[in-house]
Image: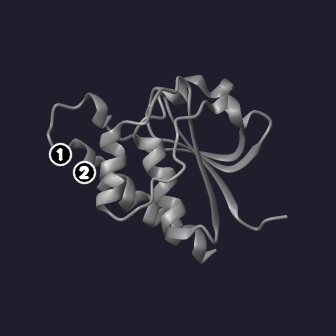
């Protein structure tokens, strides 16, 4: 049995925010966390999300857009919702000890040229803080 905390990052499309969070947590602390991501209506990962990860030297290897259905029957220590739309569908979500909501603007629909860089930085800051806090206990 693993002592790692199991984390599931969710977002509606699993195309930018949640895959970035999954890759970041794996990059920062795969020793203590098992990171996954999924969406309610998965599509394709936006290439701009991959670019944002690569620019920060975070591996995007094996990232793919996944449905939360792939995690049916699994248990997570934390389910972290990265957009307010998916929290409306809580009855569809896998079981977890705690649900956190970190609402980040969707860079896929932004008209700002640096939207992906900005969202990546916000997620990076939050994931780093989460990792630090959870590792102190």
Q: Compared with residue 80, is residue 68 higher up or lower down, i.e. above or below?
A: above
Q: Compared with residue 39, is residue 6 higher up or lower down, i.e. above or below?
A: below
Q: Indicate the position of residue 39 as horizontal and vertical percent values.
A: 54, 31
Q: Indicate the position of residue 137 as horizontal and vertical percent values.
A: 64, 74
Q: Residue furthest right?
A: 1
Task: Name the element at disc 1.
Answer: loop
Residue that appears at 29% across and 37% down: 107
Q: Nearer the viewer, residue 53 or 84?
A: 53
In the rendering, which numbered label is found on residue 29?
Answer: none
In-image side of 6 versus 124 (left or right)? right
Classed neighbour count for the residue bearing mark 1: other residues with Cα under 10 Å, few (<14), some (14–19), many (≥20): few
| Quadrant where the image shows the N terminus | bottom right
Classed neighbour count for the residue bearing mark 2: other residues with Cα under 10 Å, few (<14), some (14–19), many (≥20): some
Q: How many marks?
A: 2
In-image side of 71 versus 80 (left or right)? right
Residue 110 occupies which quadrant of the picture? top left
Q: Indicate the position of residue 12 as horizontal and vertical percent values.
A: 48, 28
Task: Name the element at disc 2.
Answer: helix
Q: Name the image colouring.
A: one colour
Residue 53 occupies which quadrant of the picture? bottom left
Residue that appears at 48% across and 34% down: 14
Q: Nearer the viewer, residue 137 or 14?
A: 14
Name the residue carrying label 1: 114
Task: Kindly check if marks 2 and 1 are in contact, taking CB atoms under 8 A apart as contact.
Answer: yes
Q: Compared with residue 44, is residue 131 higher up or lower down, i.e. above or below?
A: below
Name the residue carrying label 2: 117
Residue that appears at 68% across and 25% down: 91
Q: Nearer the viewer, residue 110 or 82?
A: 110
């Amino acid at each position: 049995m693993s002592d790692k905390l199991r984390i599931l990052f969710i977002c509606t499309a699993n195309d930018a925010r949640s895959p970035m969070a999954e890759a970041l947590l794996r990059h920062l602390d795969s020793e203590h966390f098992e990171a996954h991501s999924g969406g309610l209506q998965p599509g394709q990962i936006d290439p701009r999300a991959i670019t944002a990860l690569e620019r920060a030297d975070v591996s995007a290897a094996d990232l793919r857009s996944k449905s939360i259905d792939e995690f049916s029957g699994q248990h997570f220590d934390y389910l972290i919702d990265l957009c307010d739309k998916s929290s409306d569908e809580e009855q569809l979500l896998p079981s977890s000890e705690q649900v956190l909501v970190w609402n980040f603007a969707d860079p896929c629909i932004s008209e700002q040229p640096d939207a992906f860089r900005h969202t990546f930085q916000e997620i990076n800051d939050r994931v780093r803080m989460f990792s630090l806090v959870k590792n102190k206990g």
